[in-house]
Amino acid sequence: MNFRIVSDSSCDLGRERCQELDVELVSFYAALGDETYYREERDISTGEFYRRMAAMPGVFPKTSMPTVEDYLQAFSSAARQAVPILCICLNSRFSGSYQTARNAAEKLREELPQARVHVMDSRLATVLQGLLVEEAVRLRDLGLELEEAVAALERLPQSGRIFFTTDDLEYLRHGGRIGKAAATTGTLLQVKPLIGYENGELVTDGIAQGRKKSLVRVRELFFRYVEQKKLDLGQYRVATGFGLDREEHRDFSQQVYQGLLERGCDRPEVKIPYQIGITIGVHTGPTPIGVGLLRKAMV
């Protein structure tokens, strides 16, 4: 192994998938209904946390970022074996996880001056961060050195785009993403928000009337984006993600890939579905669902 990969749990790959990829996962913390904080994907699975959210409407979860000690524990083994480390963190605009990892790397170097740790601000979130981590794994497994992989990965975040929706506006209101009046009006009219992620920021992609129409509209927005940009999906990683409802996601995902085929696109490689993690779920509730894509590194 030319370098070790570490990521915070906002990459939404989950512990089992990270173990398959040989990626060290550093957990965010989450609490629901009391002051007991659980380590995401360690003390509690994402699915179980969503089930608790769904059973406790009106109770809004809280999250806390990983600590310096959490990152030091993740870095220690590889550093002591003189293996370089690449740590990929959630967009620094959204969290202090990136700075905390940098602080941990500095502290590690005080003890082990020879330690090589590159902490990367992914400038991405949720499934896009996960796709970047998977691309880092591919480069590692191709035999690239740490510096070569970093140079290739740094070009990719600007290509990331997500289209998604959620069913409950109250979580967005509580997180400050929309106002109380808008949330109340939207709930009364059964309007669902269409939300995107582009250039490191959340963007508004419109609204739709009801859940079914919002899912259709998310797919349409994705298809239009691929067509307008004339994207060769062979050069991209594509992923769909969901919160709690796996059956709804299965249907949504199948229609995404079928729609691409109908439009003359090669069907992208179907990955294990992403269960959107708690760090995003605190703002969306248990019902986020969407599709995202990120360019592959040209190596």
Image: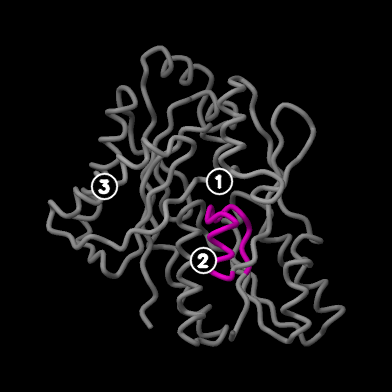
Q: Earlier in the sequence, mark 2 or mark 1?
A: 2
Q: Earlier in the sequence, mark 1 or mark 3?
A: 3
Decide: few, some or many residues near mark 2? Use Cα within 10 Å; few <14, some 14-19, many ≥20: many
Picture coordinates of residue 270 (x, y %)?
33, 58
Which residue is tagged 3? 256
User: Residue 133 got which mark?
Assistant: 2
Q: Quadrant of residue 75?
A: bottom right
Task: Name the kind of residue labelled 1 in the image.
Answer: Gly
Please provide the residue range marked out in magenta: 6-22
Residue nearest the observer in this picture, 27 or 186 = 27
Task: Name the kind of residue labelled 2 in the image.
Answer: Val
Decide: few, some or many residues near mark 3? Use Cα within 10 Å; few <14, some 14-19, many ≥20: many
Judging from the image, what secondary structure is the residue with disc 2 in? Answer: helix
User: Residue 277 got which mark?
Assistant: 1
The vertical placement of 218 against 209, above or below, is below
Task: Name the kind of residue labelled 3 in the image.
Answer: Val
Picture coordinates of residue 210 (x, y %)?
32, 22
Q: Residue at x 27, y 61 (%)?
A: 268
Quadrant for the C terminus, please: bottom left
Judging from the image, what secondary structure is the residue with disc 3 in? Answer: helix
Residue at mark 1 to residue at mark 3: CA–CA distance: 21 Å
Q: Earlier in the sequence, mark 3 or mark 2?
A: 2
Quadrant for the N terminus, please: bottom right
Residue at mark 2 to residue at mark 1: CA–CA distance: 15 Å
Q: Is residue 26 magenta?
A: no
In this view, which residue lies farthest toward the top? 188
The vertical placement of 208 against 43, above or below, is above
By secondary structure, the bulk of the magenta-drawn segment is best described as: helix
Q: Is residue 40 left or right of residue 143?
A: right
User: Residue 2 got which mark?
Assistant: none
The vertical placement of 144 against 275, above or below, is below
Decide: few, some or many residues near mark 1? Use Cα within 10 Å; few <14, some 14-19, many ≥20: many
